[in-house]
Image (spheres, rainbow, N blue to C red):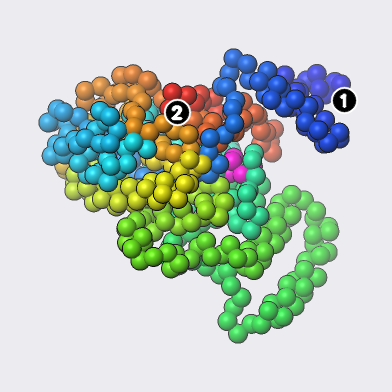
Amino acid sequence: MKDILRKLPDYDRREFLAYSAKAFLGVGLMPLAVRSNAFAGQSPMRAPTAKNVIYLYMSGGMSHLDTFDPKSERSVRGPVSPIATKGDGVQVSEYLPNIARQMDKMAVVRSLNSTQGAHEEGRYFMHSSYTKRGTIVHPGIGSWLVKMDGARNPNLPGVVHVGSANPGSGTGFFEQKFAPLVIGNPEAGLQNSKIRIGTTEKEFKDSLMLTNAFDAEFHRKYDQKKTRAYTDMYDDAIKLMSSRDLAAFELENESKNLRDAYGTNPFGQGCLLARRLVEHDVRFVEVTLGGWDTHTNNFERVEENARVLDQALGTLLADLDRRGMLEETIVVLATEFGRTPKINDNDGRDHSPTAFSCALAGGGIRGGQVYGETDETGKFVSSGKVGVPDFNATIAYALGMPLEKTVYSPSGRPFRVADKGRPILELFG
């Protein structure tokens, strides 16, 4: 045992001793001191400012120049004008009037920079903090959260994705129990969650007993992690079928006025569903809005997409704030990269990973601010450059996740929640 401990890194050794003391003695061995020493000279640890995440993903590469980083140069901004917001001195595109009224709750990061300029690779990088490889699949930040900090509602999945079966992240090399539940249509409720019509509860239970009897010998013979994960998935599904928490998926319980306020479209209703799920202690809800790949007709298509985003996000922030939920929920607006300042021959903008914008709200983030700047054309970051892992580290920091903690894949390779990213501490109030 002593040899094993000597081989461990200093932080892992301290963490092992602390948790051993807690397990065997029933007490914590100065956990705050352990954390403080372990992270000396690194990212400061503190109590989490958020416990849940609503992650709004703009798939396709949202044009920062036509949304959150408008420029004065006519040849760059095209027909889109900037407008003032409720954030002191902060301007956004005229396409976002409702978000402008909520800017006192938001922090815009205008200095994102990515190393990935293709959609699939960019989405993967944005969600996992790691570049896409053929040898391993990395977990998304939602799965990291539930793996490290657990689910808060035992009857509901810890991670839910709304609107996209493949938003760019999944459970990676983590166990299946940390995988996201995918909801295609937010207005359809949770599909296949009720006993089939014509089947009594007794018949259903009898079928389960018979299935378990048939499977018992197989599970005994192959008592392995993947086999147990498959069983756990079915157990969780059956438990959910009889849970009152199924009501979280039923949007018809909301007033028509509120549903209309979010927008009568899949993304708007997805944001409303996200709020309901967070109310039921789902830790991480992602809602995807596609259509941002604007190589052609950029201004027409961005205006259409921005109208959907503006209505849904503006209503979501006001709704969370009114319910007292914004303080404990961090709302993330993200995309894989930005768009070029040059307007091409098809009236479009092409991929530009060298500079783009994302935003954060709630969960301890100080609203009404802009972090970082791009040059006068919006092509390059001019100050406060933020890498994708840094942005994800900021989310993880708000959630109180240990940024330096190493988790090993089944092949023994070390990984961390945001790779080597450093949180943007200036964003916190």
Above or below: residue 147 compared with residue 252: above
Quadrant housing the N terminus: top right
User: Label 2: which residue?
Assistant: 429
The image position of residue 262, as x and y in percent, is 34, 56
Q: Is residue 225 visible?
A: yes
Tell me the SS state at disc 1: loop
Q: Magenta stretch?
A: 143-147
Image point (21%, 25%), residue name: 377
Q: Quadrant of residue 293?
A: top left
Residue at the image position 41 percent from the left and 38 percent from the top: 361
As drawn, the residue found furthest toward the bottom would be: 198
Badge 1 local density, few (<14 within 10 Å), some, or many (20+)? Answer: few
Quadrant that contains the C terminus: top left
Asked whether, in this view, residue 314 is left or right of residue 254, the answer is left
At horizontal 30% and vertical 51% (from top left) the residue drawn is 311
On screen, residue 378 above or below 264: above
Q: Amino acid at mark 1?
A: Met
The amino acid on which the numbered mark 2 sits, given as a three-letter code, is: Gly
Residue 257 counted in the magenta span: no
Image location of residue 226, percent across then percent down:
71, 51
Give how far across and how far down residue 351 sits, in percent.
30, 36
Residue located farthest toward the top when viewing the structure as drawn: 41
Q: Is residue 349 above or below residue 193?
A: above
Task: Identify the main secondary structure in magenta.
Answer: helix
* SS of the residue under disc 2: loop
The residue tagged 1 is 1
Q: CA distance from mark 2 to mark 1?
A: 44 Å
For the question of whether residue 353 can be seen, the reply is no
